[in-house]
Image (cartoon, rainbow, N blue to C red):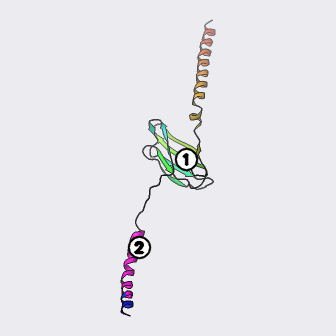
Amino acid sequence: MKTGKIGLIVLVIMTPFLLFISFIHSHSIHYEIQQKGMAMRVFYAKDDPAGYSQYELFGPGDPEPHQTGRTDKNGFLGFVPDRPGIWKIKVWGESTHGFHGVTMEVGVDQALQLESFSKPLVATSTKLIVGISIIFGVFGIYALIRSRERRAR
């Protein structure tokens, strides 16, 4: 009988203490480090990162952003996809040249790994655009010289 009373007394004394410990423990911040996710770098030029630019990340079919934030000082942002499909990232940056914005698409496969990503037209067609510009420039100079020769006659 005495051991039953002692156990009850210990239980009555320890219960508030245990509740207090769990209360303290539930209000602390925990963390773990995992090696997964995707990172992207946003920049104006190779040596000019879009640091601290605002972005919104939309999951496949999401009407509301899955994540919002700012890039770090080097123009990086990261996310961990929770489902496969096309993820859209909208980035707005302000540089000395003014306000800029871009929307990128990242394809995520069934293993939640990078499948594909979109590049802006200028990144995929730079050589073509430069080639066409040179042709038009040379033709323009030729046409200007010919028109001056005709006027001189």
Residue at (38, 75) in percent of width and height: 20
Quick check: is 28 in the magenta stretch? Answer: no
Question: Which residue position holds label 2?
Answer: 22
Question: Which residue position holds label 1?
Answer: 90
The part of the image, by quadrant, that contains residue 133 is top right
Where 81 falls versus 92 (above or below)?
below
Identify residue type, mark 2: Ser
Residue 73 drawn at (x, y percent): 42, 45
The part of the image, by quadrant, that contains residue 146 is top right
Q: Nearer the viewer, residue 103 or 2?
A: 2
The part of the image, by quadrant, that contains residue 136 is top right
Residue 85 drawn at (x, y percent): 62, 51
For residue 20, the mark is none
Circles 1, 2 touching at the beta carbon (< 8 Å): no
> Would you call the spot at circle 2 few (<14 residues within 10 Å), some (14-19), or many (20 or more)?
few
Where 117 falls versus 24 (above or below)?
above
Q: Nearer the viewer, residue 8 or 143?
A: 8
Q: Secondary structure at mark 1?
A: strand
Identify residue type, mark 1: Lys
Dot in front, 1 or 2: 2
Split into 4 quadrants, where in the image is the C terminus? top right
Residue at (39, 84) in percent of width and height: 11
Mark closest to the chain's N terminus, 1 or 2: 2
- Region rendered in magenta: 7-27
Residue 117 drawn at (x, y percent): 58, 43
**Main secondary structure of the magenta stretch:** helix
Whole-angstrom CA distance, mark 1 to mark 2, is 41 Å
Most extreme residue toward the bottom is 1
Residue at (36, 83) in percent of width and height: 13
